[in-house]
Image (spheres, helix red, strand yellow):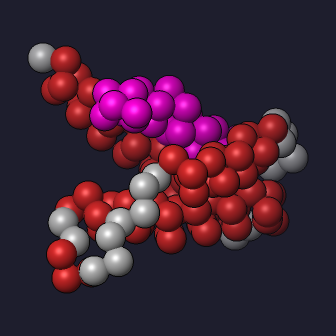
Amino acid sequence: MSMLQVNLMHVFLVGPILFGIGYKNPGENMELYNYLAILSVAMLFMVRIPSYNITKWEYYDYLKATHILLFTIFFGWISYKKDTAPEFIYHILKLLGIAVISTHLYLGISKLI
């Protein structure tokens, strides 16, 4: 997958799902949790595993490890807990959704220019 495709996927798929879960009312539109569960499982297959020699890691290797370890577990936990997660989690998801959309929108536009 090219980097532009990754940016577009984050702008039009990942960011809106995160923002939608953070913004929705409890008990409403439960499909977003299913989409988040699918994304967290798909992330295990889409993100390449960094090399095992951590001393040779570069920026993108740390990014890959963060996606595999942190985001997969966090998004899986949220999709499991659904509306019973603590309230601050939804505020974090709103901010994370906006940050993902704006960051990848900037990176995608900078690749096109």
Does residue 94 appear in this view?
A: no
Q: Residue at x 28, y 80 (%)?
A: 53
The residue shown at (53%, 39%) is: 14
**Which quarter shows the N terminus?**
top left
Q: Position of residue 42 (x, y in %)?
A: 62, 48
Counting from the top left corner in percent of width and height, residue 62 is at 30, 67
Q: Quadrant of residue 54?
A: bottom left
**Relative height, residue 70 to residue 31 (above, below):** below
Residue 56 visible within the image: yes
- Residue 70 placement, left or right of 60: right
Q: Is residue 4 magenta?
A: yes
**Residue projecting furthest to the right:** 27
Q: Quadrant of the C terminus?
A: top left
Instruction: Indicate whether 108 appears above or below 66.
Output: above
Q: In the image, which residues are magenta?
A: 1-24
Examine the image and state in which quarter residue 90 appears. bottom right
Residue lying farthest top? 113
Asked if residue 51 is positioned above or below residue 92 in the image, the reply reads below
Residue 113, magenta (yes or no): no
Q: Residue 64 is drawn in which quadrant?
A: bottom left
Q: How far across and down, in percent of the image, does residue 21 sit?
A: 66, 45
Q: Which residue appears farthest toward the left when viewing the image?
A: 113
